[in-house]
Image (tube, rainbow, N blue to C red):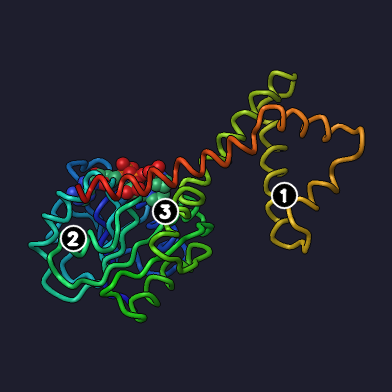
Amino acid sequence: MLNKIAFLGAGAMAEAIIAGVVQQGFIEPDKVMVTNKNDPEQLAQIKEKYQVEVNSEVKATIDQADVILLAMKPNDASSALAELKSFITKDVLILSVMAGVSTDYIAEQLAAPVAVVRVMPNTSAMIGQSATGLTKGVHATDEHMEIAKSLFETIGLVREVTEDEIHVITGLAGGGPAYFYYVIEALEDVSVELGLEKSLASDFIKQTILGAAQMLQVSSDDPATLRKKITSPAGTTEQGLLALDDYQVKLAFKQAIKQATNRSIELGKLLSE
Ligand SMILES: NC(=O)C1=CN([C@@H]2O[C@H](COP(=O)(O)OP(=O)(O)OC[C@H]3O[C@@H](n4cnc5c(N)ncnc54)[C@H](O)[C@@H]3O)[C@@H](O)[C@H]2O)C=CC1
Ligand SMILES: O=C(O)[C@@H]1CCC=N1
């Protein structure tokens, strides 16, 4: 049982994890303490929404914590770790959700053989539906991994991956919800253009994507087979798919994931320079 989880960072990702772990009952809210950088209003909002503890000081935030979760942007990593270094006094498990930032970099900055598990969740953690990759740093034990797994399993699917693979997980799933939201924005726009009320269109789009996702979960058919079952020869879907092919949408999505993955690798390299 965890004594306390300290969140350094109170932005979108931290909030999604806090909401998930508190609402799913993984930990009592009074065992969660959150800090950020110079944003008392953000802390007050988090406290009001989830009844967690907040503090403006890193030292007080991590006091007695057995898990510290780093949820600042990668370009704040260096200064955040420099500050944290002076306050870590006992064995603690560091979880980092920072894109691109390696477990070795974190341990090096803390100048200690500290247990680090790199994590790549996504904002669907908010409703217990994240898809989270975990990578074990050199000083982390199997027990540390179990703690990390049990935390993130309460907010979705978890898989252990290598530090190379987590860059791809970052491109694919960390930012993944954004790609689906982007597609949905386009579907909403065109539905309105074609004469539907936005709320009607939105209901149909959400149910269609939910139904497709659930079909993928329960059906033994692969995505291509499921697609073919919808596509009648000389029918309507065929026309839609022809347009997607004309616009090279598959290629565009492949390129999107490649670029996002490469950016994760690049963010890590920038820190090591
Ligand atoms: N937003 C997303 O969907 C996902 C984000 N991530 C990762 O999560 C991290 C945070 O991303 P967001 O929540 O989107 O960013 P954000 O900008 O919403 O939040 C960043 C937070 O870090 C705080 N912060 C900055 N420096 C700090 C310091 N030295 N000590 C304590 N707190 C500090 C800020 O005050 C803010 O509360 C990033 O590293 C990102 O790569 C990972 C997966 C998904
Ligand atoms: O865009 C980003 O850099 C972060 C990491 C994955 C999702 N958001």
Q: Give the residue number, with chain letter if any, for mark 1.
A: 212
Q: Residue at x 58, y 39 (%)?
A: 253
Q: Residues within 10 Å of mark 2 (few under 14, many from 20)?
A: many
CB-based contact (under 8 Å), mark 3 and mark 2: no
Q: Earlier in the sequence, mark 2 or mark 1?
A: 2
Q: Give the residue number, with chain letter if any, for mark 2.
A: 61
Disc 1 to disc 3, how far (Cα)? 27 Å
Give amino acid for label 1: Ala
Q: Residue at x 82, y 29 (%)?
A: 239
CB-based contact (under 8 Å), mark 1 and mark 3: no
Residue sitting nearer the eye, 212 or 232: 232
Is residue 43 shown left or right of residue 156? left
Q: Position of residue 247 (x, y in %)?
A: 67, 27
Q: Quadrant of ligand 2?
A: top left
Q: Secondary structure at mark 1?
A: helix
Which numbered dot is residue 91?
none
Q: Give the residue number, with chain letter if any, for mark 3.
A: 167
Q: Secondary structure at mark 3?
A: helix
- Screen quadrant of the N terminus: bottom left
